[in-house]
Each structure stands twice: as structure tokens, then as C-alpha cells.
Image (cartoon, helix red, strand yellow):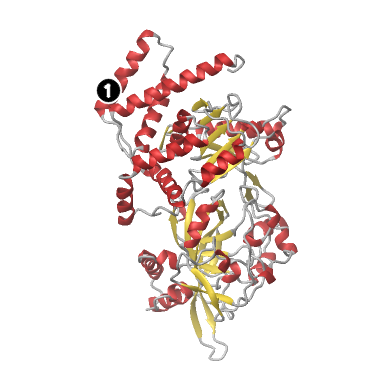
């Protein structure tokens, strides 16, 4: 059997050995997958495998095992390949049976007339890093990843820049200082959290102007300013288990063979299709999937798969839920200028989740409209604080120019035969921050109207209708939408809370910065765990409490049937659910229901008061 780390450094050797031992028995393929899955179940083995998200491509050894945390942005048509073929040994003239699986290119000397040739089918996914992944989530994931250490045992054969180093002018995050490296790296299975980020940055000699090929290549990232590698993932098994927009952690064999570009140019494709489907492997690597793990979340502070460790982790943290909630609520109250009610609703919004769908109605969504926000830089700083708490987020400044010019809805490009991404092609549980305070007077053009309509459909139905030119195709989603506005938003929402500041700091920027800097990293990490964990808890309502809620609803409508509608009841039930989960309670109690009624009454009273003050609001 292979040595302890051959399965990482030389996975094709493992595959070929099992193929050679199979004597053409088709069960060998299942044994290969079972072997790698077994290796990845070993404790800490996930951290031994280097990540395309963290390590520049030129530092990774071709044909080694790597992982990639990504979103499935597009699915290409199936392709055929030689699963089994025969080669002729030039010296002995003997025929040798070869395995073509998990490879892009066959070996020389193929016997094209062999009856032992087996043609197989695989599919290609175009995968991109998870859109809007927060810097803190990337950094923590990096610290737990396989280390790259100086060595002369492997000299990269290509000296091109990776995607992570392209388009510096589009980077929205501050650039970290890079230090030159004099040696090339190898992967070391065991690393420690003290290793520094610059170990995986590109050598300074490679920070040259990108080639014409890379500069004209559209990476098709959903969000502007995104960085990181894109990857063509070759999928062999379980095709029906993957869907567009799935978030996955893929383990596969890295392929960067330069001959792929030449082969792509020989295909009967249009130039546009060739660029989209066969980009240079040195820029868009191929990854032959051995195993893919669906990601329930991408918070690196939580266990990512249902295991005994995860159960123990959840149980231990549940004890702290109430105290962490109190700390987070106090923090958000300061951030929202002393408004405790708005902080309560913001906390509930941050843990909301579409837990099921009943016909077309998504249950659990909780879009919050925070109105009455101060102008200038307040909303931008509020977003930065939200970004520090959640693993994925994006702020959409709803200026007239943005609404009229930005592509929000993905569109099918039939010339290049690909799905052109849009800003609403996001991973589940992404926090979408819509800043309506940036919207000025002016005329929305047809594109702007389509964008506003798309945002309204996302909020109301948690779906995005992708544009396929001749028809629309509906894709369900699960995106947390927070709308900040000066008056009531022009977009729909599940709940509007007018902000009532209790403090008026002379310098807003300094005030919010001071509040954030006062939080210890350990405390912020607890908030991050809390918000992600609350989403994963199960929830139920007993028959007894259900009957009490129904009776309560009837009593509320006795005096004035118009005072409480069915929509109000639905919103209070959502609030009651989120209140319970925020305290680590998985079932609704009578006290929880009364608390939900109380804060909803306070909110509605505030909203009515705001309407009377601003008589022009709907």
C-alpha cells in the first residue's frame, strides 16, 4: 500500500496501482474513492491537504492532491475521454493497459485500434471561490491549512502569476506586504498556526505585468473586485448530487499540463467558447474530483461536517448561548447608537435562515429594513462591522449609476456557451447589505428597473430568475437581506425598524471604530460562532403552545379585527422562532411567545409614530 503521504503527493500512483491490481474488474473505481475518503476521515487529515484558496498555484505540485473551497458557478456539457486504453512499448512492442481516469492527457503510443479501449463520460464544473467570503474567514482557514515551506525538492516548471496575484487594481482589500523568496516550496503535512501569510505569497520576481492571455481572460466572478483562483473541476461520479450554486469543498488531483491550451485551440469551438471552456491551465487549473464535501456553512470556527466532534462542540457552546447573546446585543446596541430595540431585531436578522419551503413560500426568511439611518459614512461602517461577524457578505451601494449599470442577474451567453455571472449569484446564508441611503434622485433605465425587480423577487420569494434570453429560469436561494435607508425602503421587507439613536457622537467614524476596537478577538470569534451555530439548531412548536398561540391570535382580533392580520401573526411566529434559537432553545415556550409579541408591539408603535411624523411615508 502507499506510504503515509503518497496519497497526497502522488495520488495518481495510488490510482494506477489499484487499476493494475484490478485485472479489469470495474470495482476498482469504487475502491479508489473508498480509499481516499478513508484517508480524509483520519483526524486532522483535512488540514494536511494544501488548498487552492490559500496557496498560489505555482507553489503546488502538479498531479498532487489539493482541495478547493468554492461555489459551482457554471456547469458545462459532458465530455468524453479514454477511461482505459492501450499503449505500445516502443522497445518491447508489448501492449500495456493504461488508466485514463483523473487525467487530461493520455500517454504517448496509444493503440487506436485496440479493442480494450473504453470510452467514458465526465462533466466539467466551472468553480470560483465563495463570493463575498469575509477576510477573517479566509485568514482563519489559511492558518489551519497545510503549510508551504522552503525546499529545493520541487522546482515549478511554470513561472506565471496565479489568479490571486492578477488584477491588483481591482482588489478591494488592503494589500499585505510581500517578501521575496529565494527557494521553492514543498507541502508539509503538519503545520502550525503561527506560520505567516507571506509564506504563500508569490515571489517578488513574479509580480510582473500579466500576459495578454490572462489580462483578457474573464474570470466570471459574481462580485466585482473578487480575487482568487477559478478552477475547471472534472466530475466522474454522483453527477445528480450537484447543483448550480452549491458550495463545496472539493478534493481532487491538480492538473496544469500546458498541452491543454494547445488541445483546446484544436477543438471545433468558437474563439469565445474556447476562451471560456479551455482557458490556459496555468491560469485556470483543472481539478479531477475524488471527493466533494457539501458545505453547510463556511465558518472556519465551526466543525464543517456532522461528526461526533461537531455534536460535542455544539453541546458545549449551547451552555454559553445566553451569555454570548447578551454580549452581542450590547455590542450591536452601541453600534446602532444606543437603540436596543433595533439591535434586537438586527441580531434576529443575522441568525435568520430559510429552513424550508411551502409551495412557493420560503419559511424562515427575515429581511430587515433599518430606516432612519444617518447619512454620510454611517451605513458603510455598519456594513464593515457586519462583515466582521459573518463569513460571507456583500454591500450593494444602491446609487443610480450602480442600479443602471451593474449586472445583478446571471445571463446565458450562447456565443461562449457559458453562464455569465451576476452579483446575485451568491452562496447560501450570504449577508446582502443593500445601502439605499446612496440612492439619489434621477431616472432608472430599463436595466435599473430589472435590477430593482430582481431585488424585490429575491426579498419576497428568495429566488433569482436567471436570464436565458428566450426564457427565465428560476433558481431558489437563501440570502439574508438587510436594507438600510433614510426613509422607508422602496423595496419590500419582512420587518421595518426605524432607528432611534440615543447618542449623537460628534465624530461617527471615530465612535464606531472605538466600539469595534474595544472588542477582543476571542470575543468577536464567539460572536461569529454564535451567529452561525444558531442557524443550525433544530426548532419545533408543541401542540400545547400552538393552541395557546391560536387562542391568543383570536383574542387580539376580538376588539379590532384589522389591528392584527395573518401577516402580522406570521411575522411574530418568525420572531418567536428566532428569539428561541438566539437563546439556544429548540422549542417555543409560552414566555418566548410573549416576548415576541412584546417587541413586535414596541416596533409597530415606533413605526406608527414615525409615519405620523413623516406624513408622506406609505
Residue placed farthest to the left in the image?
A: 544
Q: Residues within 10 Å of mark 1 (few under 14, many from 20)?
A: few
Residue at the far bottom in the pictured view: 91
Q: Look at 64% across and 64% down and name the residue there.
A: 283
Quadrant of the snapshot with the N terminus: bottom left
The residue positioned 31% from the left and 18% from the top of the image is: 552
Q: Residue furthest top?
A: 559
Q: Can residue 360 be seen in this view?
A: no
- Residue drawn at x 43%, y 40% is 328
Number of numbered discs visible in the structure rendering: 1
Identify the image quadrant of residue 503: top right
179 and 506: which is toward the camera:
506
Please say if 359 is above or below 197: above
> Where residue 251 sits: x, y (%)?
47, 63
Q: Position of residue 201 (x, y in %)?
A: 60, 66
Looking at the rendered structure, the secondary structure element under dot 1 is: helix
Q: Where is residue 305 in the image (x, y as percent from the top left)?
A: 38, 54
Q: Nearer the viewer, residue 77 or 173?
A: 173
Q: In this view, does 116 lie to the left or right of 581?
A: right
Q: In which quarter of the image is the C terminus?
A: top right
| Relative to 542, residue 206 above or below | below
Side (left or right) of 467 relative to 517: right
Q: Most extreme residue toward the front, as rendered?
A: 506
Q: Name the residue under label 1.
A: 547
- Is 431 above or below relative to 4? above
Quadrant housing residue 126? bottom right
Q: Is residue 210 in view? A: yes
Q: Where is residue 152 in the image (x, y as percent from the top left)?
A: 57, 81
Q: Viewer-proximal residue, 85 or 440?
A: 440
The front one of 95 and 333 is 333
Amino acid at each position: 500500500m502507499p506510504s503515509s503521504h503518497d496519497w497526497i503527493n502522488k495520488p495518481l500512483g495510488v490510482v494506477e496501482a489499484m487499476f493494475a491490481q484490478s485485472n479489469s474488474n470495474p470495482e476498482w473505481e469504487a475502491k479508489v474513492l473508498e480509499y481516499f475518503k478513508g484517508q480524509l476521515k483520519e483526524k486532522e487529515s483535512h488540514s494536511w491537504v494544501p488548498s487552492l484558496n490559500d496557496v498560489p498555484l505555482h507553489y503546488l505540485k502538479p498531479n498532487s492532491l489539493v482541495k478547493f473551497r468554492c461555489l459551482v458557478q457554471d456547469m458545462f456539457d459532458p465530455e468524453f475521454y479514454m477511461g482505459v486504453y492501450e499503449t505500445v512499448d516502443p522497445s518491447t512492442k508489448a501492449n500495456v493497459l493504461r488508466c485514463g481516469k483523473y487525467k487530461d492527457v493520455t500517454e504517448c503510443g496509444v493503440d487506436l485500434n485496440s479493442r480494450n479501449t473504453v470510452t467514458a463520460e465526465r462533466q466539467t464544473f466551472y468553480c470560483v471561490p465563495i463570493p463575498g467570503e469575509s477576510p477573517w474567514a479566509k485568514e482563519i482557514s489559511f492558518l489551519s491549512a497545510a503549510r508551504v515551506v522552503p525546499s529545493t525538492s520541487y522546482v515549478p516548471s511554470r513561472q506565471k502569476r496565479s489568479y490571486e496575484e492578477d488584477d491588483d487594481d481591482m482588489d478591494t482589500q488592503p494589500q499585505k506586504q510581500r517578501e521575496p523568496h529565494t527557494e521553492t516550496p514543498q507541502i508539509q503535512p503538519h503545520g502550525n498556526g503561527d506560520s505567516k501569510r507571506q509564506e504563500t505569497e508569490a515571489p517578488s520576481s513574479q509580480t510582473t505585468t500579466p500576459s495578454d492571455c490572462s489580462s483578457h481572460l474573464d474570470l466570471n466572478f459574481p462580485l466585482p473586485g473578487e480575487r482568487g483562483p477559478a478552477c475547471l473541476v472534472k466530475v466522474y461520479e454522483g453527477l445528480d448530487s450537484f447543483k448550480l450554486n452549491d458550495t463545496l469543498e472539493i478534493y481532487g488531483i491538480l492538473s496544469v499540463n500546458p498541452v491543454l491550451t494547445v488541445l483546446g485551440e484544436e477543438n471545433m469551438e468558437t474563439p469565445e467558447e474556447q476562451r471560456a471552456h479551455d482557458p490556459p491551465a496555468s491560469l485556470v487549473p483543472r481539478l479531477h474530483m475524488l471527493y466533494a464535501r457539501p458545505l453547510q456553512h463556511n465558518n472556519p470556527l465551526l466543525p464543517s461536517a456532522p461528526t461526533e466532534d461537531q455534536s460535542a462542540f455544539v453541546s458545549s457552546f449551547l451552555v454559553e448561548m445566553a451569555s454570548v447573546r447578551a454580549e452581542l446585543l450590547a455590542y450591536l446596541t452601541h453600534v446602532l447608537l444606543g437603540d436596543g430595540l433595533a439591535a434586537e431585531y438586527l441580531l434576529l436578522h443575522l441568525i435568520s435562515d430559510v429552513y424550508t419551503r411551502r409551495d412557493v413560500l420560503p419559511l424562515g426568511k427575515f429581511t430587515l429594513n433599518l430606516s432612519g439611518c444617518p447619512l454620510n459614512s454611517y451605513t458603510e461602517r455598519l456594513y464593515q462591522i457586519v462583515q466582521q461577524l459573518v463569513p460571507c457578505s456583500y454591500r450593494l451601494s444602491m446609487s443610480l449609476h450602480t442600479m443602471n449599470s451593474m449586472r445583478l442577474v446571471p445571463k446565458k451567453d450562447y456565443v461562449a456557451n457559458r453562464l455569465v455571472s451576476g452579483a446575485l449569484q451568491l452562496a447560501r446564508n450570504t449577508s446582502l447589505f443593500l445601502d439605499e441611503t446612496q440612492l439619489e434622485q434621477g431616472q432608472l433605465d430599463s436595466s435599473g428597473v430589472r435590477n430593482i425587480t430582481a431585488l424585490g423577487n429575491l426579498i419576497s420569494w428568495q429566488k433569482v430568475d436567471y436570464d436565458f434570453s428566450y426564457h427565465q429560469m428560476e433558481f431558489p436561494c437563501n440570502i439574508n437581506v438587510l436594507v438600510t435607508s433614510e426613509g422607508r425602503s422602496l423595496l419590500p421587507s419582512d420587518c421595518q425598524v426605524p432607528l432611534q439613536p440615543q447618542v449623537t457622537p460628534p465624530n461617527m467614524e471615530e465612535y464606531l471604530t472605538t466600539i469595534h476596537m474595544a472588542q477582543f478577538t476571542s470575543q468577536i470569534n464567539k460572536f461569529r460562532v454564535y451567529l452561525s451555530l444558531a442557524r443550525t439548531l433544530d426548532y419545533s412548536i408543541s401542540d400545547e403552545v400552538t393552541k395557546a398561540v391560536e387562542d391568543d391570535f383570536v383574542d387580539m382580533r376580538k376588539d379590532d379585527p384589522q389591528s392584527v392580520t395573518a401577516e402580522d401573526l406570521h411575522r411574530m411566529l418568525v420572531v418567536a422562532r428566532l428569539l428561541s434559537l438566539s437563546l439556544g432553545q429548540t422549542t417555543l415556550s409560552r414566555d418566548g411567545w410573549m416576548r415576541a409579541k412584546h417587541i413586535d408591539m414596541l416596533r409597530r408603535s415606533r413605526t406608527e409614530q414615525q409615519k405620523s411624523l413623516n406624513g408622506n411615508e406609505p
